[in-house]
Amino acid sequence: MGEALRSLTAPSMAARMNKPEAKPWINAINAYTPGKARSDDGRALIKLSANENPLGCSADATAAMAEARLTLARYPDPASNALREALGAHYELESGQIVCGTGSDELLNLIAMGYAGAGDDIIYVRYGFSVYDIAARKCAANVVVAPDQDYGTDVDALLELVTDKTRVVFVANPNNPTGTYLNDSEMKRLHAGLPRDCVLVLDQAYGEYLEDDGPASFDLARNYDNVLITRTFSKIYGLAAERIGWAYGHPELIATLNRIRAPFNVTAAGQAAGIAALADTEFVKGSRKHNTEWREWMASEFAALSNHGLKVVPSWANFLMVMFEGKCSAEVAYKGLMDEGYIVRWLPGQGLGNGLRITIGTEDENRGVMSALRKILEAHN
Ligand SMILES: Cc1ncc(COP(=O)(O)O)c(C=O)c1O
């Protein structure tokens, strides 16, 4: 470097003696809090905190994974072609309009990154899935939180917040952590009220738990070029460990996500397991039936505890949100259940300090958690 040039650059280099600083919008992120599997003192607990399938996964999926693991030295198919074909055939969708992701988490983040940046707004509903907040902040977008209605989406309140800056709206349907569901006509009204250049993301992680889940569930994304649907193999298919998600939408939306996703984002074993899991319709049917029956049982058990101030939020998913409005607080019940060997989800960080989200478990787990809860409530009467 010439002397003249060195003297020009030297002062600014000297000024850069501090340690690296993350961007302020990154520092503002509260890292995702996963559902715990152990107590604070390290004991293994019965896990009803992460909305996993208590029945496990299809035996065919386990076998397909074992076989795929014989070729560990090879990269997986970067485009998850066979899995997309299988998804297209199963859900009656064009496979070219599907992209797979490392869980639907990856896709939710990519949607925010692809369509919003500094100065843009991303809207989600209060008590929405916590990843929306992280995804929005990551790309320096403004987070706009719409008020809820009875813990669910309030279409009018959300539409009131739409401005020229709105780029993405996230709605989980059914919603996590509340389990609420926005019906078809309300969802269409929400979509109709949004500007054309705004992406509506319908996060259907729990869509397969609906009794009437079918091709119509995809209508908005099929008919409009500003709607993306995200789904996952982590819930009813019981493949959470493999991290397999997918999104469906207009080819241009999908092209954006393909441009920025990681090249080999779904493992070979995950792709094989996903294909086998889709084909095992009996396993999915059985999981849905188990969930519906035990969710109803749990809801009626909670209703019978209304004298203790318990109120259950109607749920369409594989969990129930129960509010504690009596003498025993949600925090006391959370800690008491942990002492009794059960871990559920207490979400004070999401403004839900007075509620517990409880995943529907096996019969033994459901009966066990209910009798543990009764014991705790009686002790605090
Ligand atoms: C509403 C919702 N969307 C997306 C996800 C992410 O699922 P995954 O990344 O495992 O596909 C979850 C997981 O709990 C969820 O509850």
Image: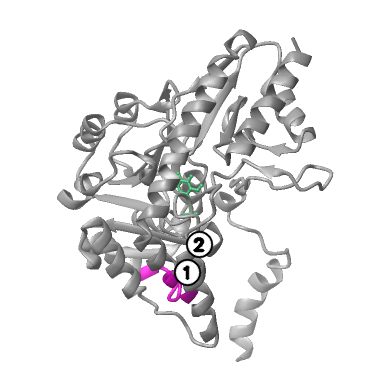
Depth check, front residue: 25 or 204: 204
Q: Residues within 10 Å of mark 1 (few under 14, many from 20)?
A: many
**Image position, residue 126 (x, y; %):** 47, 31
Residue type, mark 2 in image? Arg
Q: How is the image coloured?
A: one colour
Q: Is residue 59 above or below residue 158?
A: below
Q: Is residue 368 above or below residue 255?
A: above
User: Badges 2 and 1: C-beta atoms under 8 Å apart?
Assistant: yes
Viewed as shown, does residue 202 lie left or right of 30? left
For residue 243, the mark is 2
Q: Is residue 198 above or below residue 316?
A: below
Q: Is residue 206 above or below residue 377?
A: below
Residue underneath mark 1: 270
Q: Is residue 173 visible?
A: yes
The magenta-colored residue range is 259-272
Q: Residues within 10 Å of mark 2 (few under 14, many from 20)?
A: many
